[in-house]
Image (cartoon, helix red, strand yellow):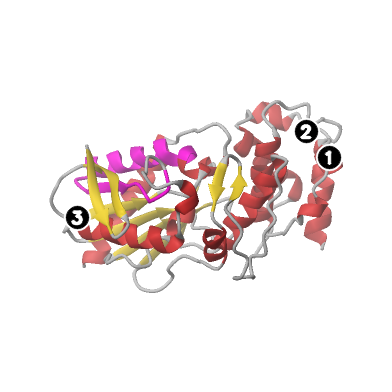
Amino acid sequence: MIHHYDWAGGREAMIRFGPATGPVVVLALPLFEEANRTRTFATGLLRQLADRGIGSVLPDLPGQNDSPVATEHAMLAGWRAAFAAAVAATGRPAHSVTIRGGSLVDHDAAVLGRWQLAPAKGEALVRELFRTAQAGGEPVEIDLNAWSDEGGPVAIAGNRVSRPLLRDMNAADCVRDGLVRMVRLETDPAVADRKVAGVPLWRQSEPGNDPALAALLADDIADWIDRCAS
Amino acid sequence: MTRPPVDATVRAVLKDVLSLSDQRVAAFDDDTPLFGALPELDSMAVAGVLTEIEDRLNILIEDDEVDGEMLETFGALRRFAERKVAG
């Protein structure tokens, strides 16, 4: 069911799944094009959580998906404020579940625990965005260290992205303190609490799905929520 | 950190990112043409392939190292990755 939440910058849509009481998962999708490649998988994951009696919400971030905010006005601070507002709007004990660049936005949210799938450093995401722009014949010209560089938004694969967002993302990383559980694909050599078999759906040019992986991760998240409560 | 064999990693990345079948990827040899010959490998997919190779092999590919030649054949891409891993 589609609902809305209010944050300091306006109103955004959010989809609710599962029971309306008890602990709630608030999910942050990956950023930009990766969100489109993983939306089907992520909503499948939330439905699997609903089957396990856990409710969830999937909020739009300002400047992403169907947001009324133009993409070029998206800011990292705005994403964090909006995500925190979406968590607060649930009024329930909340857990964040974040995928890839979504792990850069739950810093200000009042959550009991954080569960991350293949969290990506902002630096790596920015580099991939630049590479995508270059492959499309539109190389990005920006000095990520020059805060005085106040040129307009840059075009990356059909999106207009603000320079401050790219600079903020470039310096950002996921939350590593507190109750954090990190899950990665077994093909990813980076450190994780658990490695699972699967393909990186966020990198596939054709959006795919992996219901078996979603089921396995739903079990992991349900178990994690239990452990956070004990 | 242990590194997986480069050949197998490059094959697995092409399979996973471009959604190719096991059989198709297993049949790749050094002369198998890639960019311009594989319809799945368009200019946008190149970014995903290279970044996934970087992540899995824990290497960093500079933009000025990316050219048509390294993507011309499977062998060229594998040799490029091997050189990067060797440092």
Answer yes or no: do the residues labelled 2 and 1 have beta carbons within 8 Å?
A: yes
Task: Determine if marks 2 and 1 fall on one subunit.
Answer: yes
Nearer-the-camera pick, B16 or A175: A175
- Picture layout, residue A73 above or below residue A15: below
Amino acid on which the number 1 mark rests in the picture: Gly
Query: Can residue A225 be spotted in the picture?
Result: no
Q: CA distance from mark 3 to mark 2?
A: 48 Å
State the residue position of label 1. B68
Q: CA distance from mark 1 to mark 3?
A: 51 Å
Q: Furthest residue to the left? A: A21
Q: Is residue A46 magenta?
A: yes
Tell me which corner region of the image, top left, top right, bottom left or bottom right, holds residue A126. Answer: bottom right
State the residue position of label 2. B35
- Picture layout, residue B69 above or below residue A220: above
State the residue position of label 3. A90
Answer yes or no: do the residues labelled 1 and 3 have beta carbons within 8 Å?
A: no
